[in-house]
Amino acid sequence: MEEHGQLAFADFQESCAMMWQKYPGSRQSIPLGIKVLFGGVFGAGGFALVYYLIQKLHSRGLYYKLAMEQLQSHPEAQEALGPPLNIHYLKLTDRENFVDIADAKLKIPVSGSKSEGLLYVRSSRGGPFQRWHLDEVFLELKDGQQIPVFKLSGENGDEVKKQ
């Protein structure tokens, strides 16, 4: 009886193995369609992870943080947007969003209870290991109204004019 039970289990194992094999006797035990499906899922997941990490990288940059500080401390901009202030992800495919060694230019989507718009940020630095400073920050609301938030003025960049 035990031998019969062992044979039945062995037959079951063999039939399962045959069912999952593309060709009997081959080492390929997972159908191609399943491989493609899992490859697509892992590929999309990998892309989403990279997109998220790039967003985090930008939001931790000093050029981004300085602009957010200016927006949050600007009463006219806060009043126009309305509380609470929501900062949304950058549109990474927008050619106007770029950061290189010495310059950063961003369009940051923002919204509040009253309105929404884009926070335009221009920032620069003297070299790769120098500190970022803001050149200009302004808020453009969806109705087209522009609110100057910050502008660096002066020949040497030593005068700061908070709008």
Image: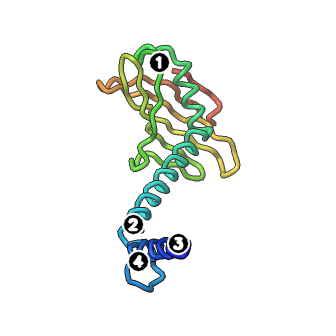
- Label total for image: 4
Assess disc 4: are there few (<14), some (14-19) or many (≥20) residues with their C-alpha within 10 Å of its C-alpha.
Answer: some
Mark 3 vs mark 1, foreground winner is 3
In terms of sequence position, does the residue under pointer 4 or pointer 2 come before the other?
4
Q: Residue at x 38, y 83 (%)?
A: 23
Mark 4 vs mark 2, foreground winner is 4
> Badge 1 is on which residue?
84
Q: State how the image is colored.
A: rainbow
> Badge 3 is on which residue?
1
Q: Position of residue 120 (x, y in %)?
A: 45, 34
> Badge 4 is on which residue?
18
Q: Is the C-beta separation of discs 3 and 1 under 8 Å?
A: no
Using the numbered discs, state the Cα–Cα distance from disc 3 to disc 4 in whole angstroms.
26 Å
In terms of sequence position, does the residue under pointer 3 or pointer 1 come before the other?
3
Q: Secondary structure at mark 2?
A: helix
In terms of sequence position, does the residue under pointer 1 or pointer 2 come before the other?
2
Q: Position of residue 21 (x, y in %)?
A: 41, 77
